Image: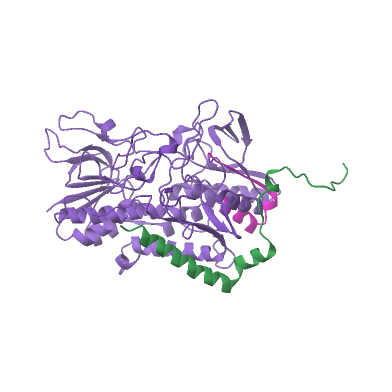
Chain colours: A green, B purple
Amino acid sequence: MPKATNREPYQQSYYPPTPTGFTRYMRNSLPWQLFRFFMINLKVLKLMLKSQH
Amino acid sequence: MSRVVILGAGISGHTAARYLSKWIGKKHEVVVVSPNAKWNWIPSNIWVGVGDMTEEEVTFDLKQVYDKAGITFHQAKGISIHPEGNADNESPHVTVEFTDEARAGQADTLTYDYLINATGPKLNFNATEGLGPDNGHTVSVCTAKHALEANEKLQEQIEAMKKGAERTFVIGTGHGMCTCQGAAFEYTYNVDHALREAGVRDKARIIWISNEYELGDFGMGGVHIKRGGYVTNAKTFTESLMVERDIEWITRAHVNKIEPGKIHYELLDGSMGELDFDFSMLIPPFAGVGLKAFDKKDEDITANLFAPNGFLKVDGDYTPRPYEEWSAEDWPRTYQNPIYKNLFAIGIAFAPPHPISKPMKSTNGTPISPTPPRTGMPSAAMGLNVAKSIRDMLNGAESPTHHASMTEMGAACMASTGSHIFRGSAVTMTVYPVVPDFVKYPAYGRDLSLTTGEVGLAGHWMKYVLHYTFMYQSKMKPGWSYMPD
């Protein structure tokens, strides 16, 4: 069987966006993730407070 | 002295019990009835299901905690509600059947001044032939015990793959009317992570199968989030996560039969499919636990009090309407039963007025669309606010003083993988409100500053913090009531 030199486009995995190297790096960057941790905490706290009536 | 009886000690029932014992426990009696001796922080069962946590880390003994808090605990299941009393007992009461070893099968009657139904769901594995760990061919992570079994079977597959075998993993929903897609979604990523850590991911095909119309629906009709300078949909976000992890997906599916190694399903377009598998974790559909209700003449009034799916009707608007006419106003606010004002239902036990996702039927007439999720944060908010209302009603208020509609509360979901603090990851999603309100937020039905999605270590840490915080708080250790619910 000859080696494929082209890629089938119309597949499930062809369309969704995939993360760039920079995005993947930022997902594990400690300074950035510490900042995001703080921000997620704030957001969850805000969600909890907005759920009390 | 009044008595408040709480049927069920899950997230919503236990939250209500904790606060009621703190606020009214010295003057009134708080009674909890639960068929389980242990409390389970269900969100962390996912980690038990891949061997990252033990059963002991996600459960604790309810009686010990309740004894210290002055709460009366009966290990029993609710059988029937008699809101008007009857000839034998004029007071409103419930009948229960004990499940502890000493009194197993014995029945008793508990009178109440206020009753909170927080019984959670019946895991309806029987809805699909061959579904579930007991009489079927799939595993589950719905209870800590199920999750332990799931991990045992997962480890067997990993061992076989280490010896060179190839395996197919199918994870998702086991029926066309399931909810809780989020739990299955999180388990998928944890299995993917476990296989990578074991160095066998290249031997595995992982397939997601669900009743969602599109990926990222999660029973909430999907959500919109801001990402990369656009407002995009959770469909795009979730598909991206699947592709990145080389996970295939099948949506719009009703699993109708499972044989050893083979899943049969129907799609919305009416076509039928089959899927071979070696390991499968499929969430069952939920139903009410089967409580009955009787009036003072002992005539069955179950159909008046409960919706056909077995969940208790509260102050929602249950008038059948087409999807286009659904609104935020339909959803219950106080969780008080409209007929019996001293009866409440919270968590999964209350009857939603309708789904959130648009109902769909296949060309064969099979309903294939998610039912509404009622996850941890909304359940806790309902428990807390109903406890506040009952406290105030015991102090003289005529009607509930607090409300917690799912159209005015948020939810956070952290699908976290791995146990290593720096090697794990998480998909973090926050949603506000859970039920979209297109009058208040015309474009997308939700507040986009609080409806977000991101991937990274931060969510992984957050999930850990939440696990240990909620376990501490639920054990009612010093300062628990100062921690947010």
| Residue B161 appears in the picture as rendered | yes
Question: Quick check: B471 above or below B270?
Answer: below
Is residue B209 magenta-colored? Answer: yes
Q: In the orientation shown, which residue stands out farthest toward the bottom?
A: A31
B315 vs A35, left or right, is: left
Q: In the orientation shown, which residue stands out farthest toward the top?
A: B364
**Viewer-proximal residue among B347 and A23:** A23
Q: Position of residue B237 (x, y in %)?
A: 59, 53
B454 vs B306, left or right, is: right
Tell me the quadrant of the picture where the C terminus of chain B can be found.
bottom left
Q: In the orientation shown, which residue stands out farthest toward the right?
A: A2
Specify the segment rendered in magenta: B188-211
Task: Locate residue B122: give its quadrant.
Answer: top left
Tell me the quadrant of the picture where the N terminus of chain B can be found.
bottom left
Residue in the picture at 46% in, 50% down: B442
Question: Quick check: B412 above or below B256?
Answer: below
Q: Position of residue B2 (x, y in %)?
A: 14, 51
Residue in the picture at 64% in, 64% down: A23
